[in-house]
Amino acid sequence: MVENGENKKEHASASVLNKIRANPWILASIFLALVVIVILFVKGGGFTGGAISESEASDKLTAFVEAQGGTVDIVSTAKEGSLYKITMNYQGEEIPVYVTNDGKYLIPSLVPLSAQDAGAEQTAASGTAARTQEVPKSAKPVVELFVMALCPYGLQMEKGALPVANLLKDKIDFKIKFVYYAMHGQKEIDENTNQYCIQKEQSSKLNSYLACYLDSGDGSGCLVSSGIDMTKLTACIAAADKQFKLTENFNDKGSWLSGQFPKYDVDAADNTKYNVGGSPTLIINGVQASSARDPASLLKTICGAFTTQPAECKQTLSSAAPSPGFGAAAASGSSGSGSAGCATPTA
């Protein structure tokens, strides 16, 4: 509703204050905006000089923020045209900012000039706000990781989460769930359903299967090496196909999301419940949670949801971020702990 009259400014001010209280990340954005003002109006100058490396740009950003009294950890870096996109953890929140490739200027965010991109930007901002909710505590945290079976970044978070699930065992209720659409064709749908059925009917073998699959990408070979009962698996797949109309949805291209991505409705209700948009999405005790993707960070995040933490939470897991995609290698630099994912703007 658009307000008019004497109370308009008062109501607008109250709205801003309410948004800040509900979304602490806004305070971080304000801080970064002040940093830009300092750079542009005190130092002056233009985009000059030779390009520096992503690592050097990250170091400059860290040094500058710390000089202003802040503390940040660099989560990921990526080159985007004449800018470096640097995702940093500031006061517990992951915030993407941009640094010119000469390392001289910081830009808190990019403002899209097209209506379509602006809508996608708003969707991303809404997702960030959702992830900043405080995760409620419980005696046995419910951990739900939504992925696509061929999304490199979903695989990355699964590789980080699996050691945590193996460590905490039945002290948490850990489930792999699936995003409501597929971005990687029939092969992804088939693999999603394999994992859904293994978890549903042969759950004691799921972690063994996932460890093999995440390393090799060889689903067929991992079914054998993990001792999966193929008769039970085949029957479950057929039942799931009928119940959730998997083949029917794949063949009905008119129903595809954005005309490109077939629906995958196995966990559709939970996707709606949690406002899942892409892979990976981490839900803890019913709330979207943000975490770096290495085992140590995920252990810390999940253990923070216990009313009383078990002894396992004091154990040390690897802080090396897994690489996106298949394989056991760690990610190079800090890029493996970023916020990249598989999603469509209309999700």
Image (cartoon, helix red, strand yellow):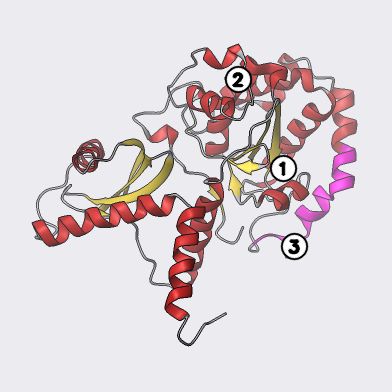
Secondary structure state at the residue bearing disc 2: loop
Closer to viewer: mark 2 or mark 3: 2
- Judge whether residue 255 is colored magenta: yes
Q: CA distance from mark 2 to mark 3?
A: 45 Å
Closer to viewer: mark 2 or mark 1: 2
Segment tinted magenta in the rendering: 238-257
User: Can you see residue 255?
Assistant: yes
Residue at coordinates 59% horizontally, 29% vertically from top-left? Answer: 158
Query: Would residue 302 be found to the left or right of residue 170 on screen?
Result: left
Q: Which mark is residue 189?
A: 1
Residue at coordinates 56% horizontally, 28% vertically from top-left? Answer: 304
Q: Quadrant of the rendered structure where residue 162 is?
A: top right
Residue 118 or residue 231, whichever sits in front: 118
Instruction: Please give the residue where the numbered disc 3 appears in the rendered image.
Output: 255
Quadrant containing the N terminus in the rendered view: bottom right
Residue at coordinates 47% horizontally, 87% vertically from top-left? Answer: 5
- Judge whether residue 92 is colored magenta: no
Q: Quadrant of the rendered structure where residue 186 is?
A: top right
Q: Earlier in the sequence, mark 1 or mark 3?
A: 1
Q: Residue 170, how many percent across, how many down?
A: 73, 18
Q: Which mark is residue 148?
A: none
Q: Residue 111, how many percent across, how many down?
A: 36, 65
Residue type at mark 1: give it: Ile
Instruction: Please give the residue where the numbered disc 2 appears in the rendered image.
Output: 309
Callout 3: 10 Å neighbours few (<14), some, many (20+)? some
